Each structure stands twice: as structure tokens, then as C-alpha cells.
Image: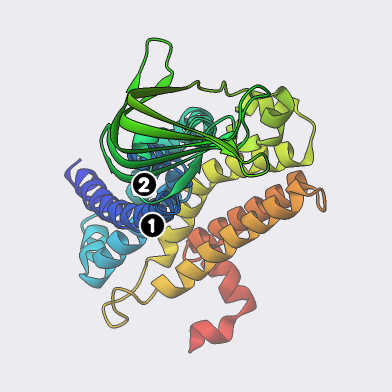
Amino acid sequence: MIIRRYIIKETFKAQLAILVILFMIFFSQKLIRIMSSAVDGDIPSSLITPLLLLGVSNMAQLILPLSLFLGILIAFGRFYTDSEMVAMYACGVKKKIIYQVVLFLSIITCCVSTANLVWFGPWSSVQEEKLVENAKLNPSLAGLLAGQFQRTPKGDSVIYLGEVERNNIKQIFIAQTNPLKNERPSVILSNQGKITHDSEGNQIIILDNANRYEGSTKLRDFRISHFDNYQAVIKPKTLTVSDEDTKDKVEQLSFAQLRAIKTAKAKAEYYWRISLIISVPLMAFLVIPLSASNPRQGRLARILPAMLLYLVYFLLESSIKAHGSKGRIDPTFWFNAVNGLYFILAVIFNLWDSIPMRKIRYRYFPARFAS
């Protein structure tokens, strides 16, 4: 049907526009946080792009329901303001077509949201943590910022690089602060060098015309050595994750794992994900009557009350998750209570102008109809 395709097209265009705008806002915030960590030296600059891509899943959790909610609100509000909805009803278009369109868009959005929460979300959270922890455990010397002191993975040496350009380095300072039993503290200085890797994944520093100063101020015994070509090997550490650590990070667990773990955090995370999926069709059908307006009211007349309802819903859900994860409240009851309350509101709002509801309103409030 042409009318159905037209409504789907206009609503989807509005939803897509809102999705892009919200994504750019969340993406910019994520980018600022990652860039700040990179400037502080907490993560190498090479991880900025992977961390941004992996962070899309976390952004999509709240963006997808909100994009559909605002898309319906704006598109349907325009239909009412431009009298298109009145013309549709006058031409015999039934209201059930509106609900069919919303149901169709809700199913598509709900499928994407479910796939994100069930598969991509936990996987991206695991991969993001591995990248960050591995970068902290085995910092890439080529990825270090110039002018910063950095400890080696073993913690026995401190490295300073004056200039870093890909694998070429200049003004190198290496201080071995915690040497082995048979060795003494040493300092290595060189004007230039490069960084390579061997077949086993070890980082190899090759310095040209390096000077090594070895000795201790307590013994007053120093040895100065000069090397035309000096090589130092940094062996990587293996990242190990215990089962207890995995259980504590509930955002990395699947639905089946959350269901099996009987902890407050797992229970709160489980019902939080379910609520995010339920919120897509729930808020979509709730906003249908809220988008109705007349030309005198303007297009944005219903946005404020609709956004207040949406904001209250997710503030309640977030509060329940926070308190439920600490064991203060039962997340099962409160998540179901909030979803049930908003379901009742959606039913009341959608039936408010129906004939049975009009009869009930006329029976108990006849004065309003008389006026």
C-alpha cells in the first residue's frame, strides 16, 4: 500500500537522521575520553581507532531506542501539523496502519538491539579490555609519545624517547633501576636507533653509537662502555584472566552466563538488557498518541512531555540497575514494575480517544464534553 510505504519511508528517514546525530554526539564524547587517555600515556595512539569501533556497541544500547522514539515523534508530529494525518483519515486510512508501521520499525530496531546486546556487546567489551590491558602490560615502544618516561613490562627499567617517528627513535635514555643479582644499575644513552620485532614477538631496541654507564654511587665504582651497535630485548608478558575476574565483569557475559550466575550484579545486568530490548516497542507505541497535535500547537508541542516520560523511564531503569547490582533492591520486581507501569500508560494513551474510552469519560466527566 502506497500510504504504508510513505509512512515507513518518512518515519525511517527521521529515525536515521536522529540516529546519525546521536551517534555523532556519543562518538565525539568517546573520542575525547580516548584521546585524553592517549595524551596522558595510558594507552598508545595506535589503539584510538580500535577502541572507538569497539565502543559503538555501548553507544548503540541507548541510541537505538531513543532514535526510534524521536523518529516517530518528529515524523508523526509533522503529519499532524501539515494536516497529512487528517487527510489520510478522511480518505479512509485506518489507524491500524499506523500501528502496523510502528510495529514493523520496532521489529527491525528490536532485532538490531537484541543482536547488539546478546552477541556484539559482550564480545566488544571483552576485546576492548584485552586491548587496554595488553597495552598496559606490553607497551609498544614505537607507540610511546615523545618526551615521556615509560617503565618496561618487567618494571626493572625506565625508557625515555625524545622523538618517535614510526619505528625510528632519537634521543634515547634507558635506566636499568632494578638489575639482576650479578649486575649493577646502568644508564644507556644514544642519539638515534630503531625498534624491530623478532619471530617470537619480542621487541628489540637497536641503538647506534650508544654509551653505557654502569655502577653504583655507594661503591664509587663505574664502568663506561661504548657500542657501535647496541641491542636490548624486551619480552612480552602473557595476559591471564581468571574465571573470578570474568564473573565480576558482568557486561562481558552472555545471557546464558548471566542467568547461571546467582549474583546481584549478574541479575541486575540480565534484567537491564531485557529492559533495553523491551523499551524499543514499548516506547515506540507510547509515543504514537503523544505525537498527535494540531497545526496551531506547532510541530514540537508534544516533544517536551514525551521526552520527560522517556527520561524518567531510563532514569528509573538506570537507578534500579545501580541499586540492584549492589543488592539493595530486587531488580526482578522493580524492572518488571517500571515496564508494567509504562505498558499501562501506553495502553491508556492509545485508547484515550477510542469510542469505549469516550463513553467512559462522558459517563464520569460529562461537564468536560458539554463545554
Mark pair 2, 1: CA separation: 17 Å
Image point 53% across, 30% down: which residue?
126
Say which of 11 and 1 sits in front. 11
The residue pinned by badge 1 equals 32
Percent of width and height locating residue 155: 59, 35
Label 2 or label 1, whichever lies nearer to me, is 2
Tell me residue 28's x, y (percent). Answer: 34, 56
Left or right? Give the position of 300 relative to 33: left
367 up-or-down from 338: above or below: below
Snapshot colouring: rainbow
Q: Is residue 341 above or below residue 192?
A: below
Pinpoint residue 312: horizontal percent, then vertical percent: 58, 65
Q: In the rendered image, is residue 215 in sight?
A: yes
Please report contact status of discs 2 and 1: CB closer than 8 Å, yes or no. no
Along the horizontal axis of the image, is 147 left or right of 192? right
Given residues 46 and 369, the one toward you in this image is 46
In the picture of the structure, the residue carrying the numbered disc 2 is 145
Q: Nearer the viewer, residue 156 or 335?
A: 156
Q: Which kind of residue does numbered mark 1 sit on?
A: Ile
Coordinates of residue 226 in the picture (x, y in percent):
37, 29
Tell me the crowding category of disc 1: few under 14, some 14 to 19, or many 20 or more residues within 10 angstroms, Cα based.
few
Q: Residue at x 68, y 50 (%)?
A: 321
Query: Which of the 4 quarters of the picture holds residue 245?
Result: top right
Q: Earlier in the sequence, mark 2 or mark 1?
A: 1
- In terms of secondary structure, where does tag 2 sit? loop
Q: Is residue 356 left or right of residue 84?
A: right
Task: Name the kind of residue labelled 2 in the image.
Answer: Leu
Q: Is residue 228 left or right of residue 216?
A: left
- The residue depicted at 53 percent of the width and 48 percent of the height is 279
Say which residue appears at 41% left-offset and 37% top-offset. 54
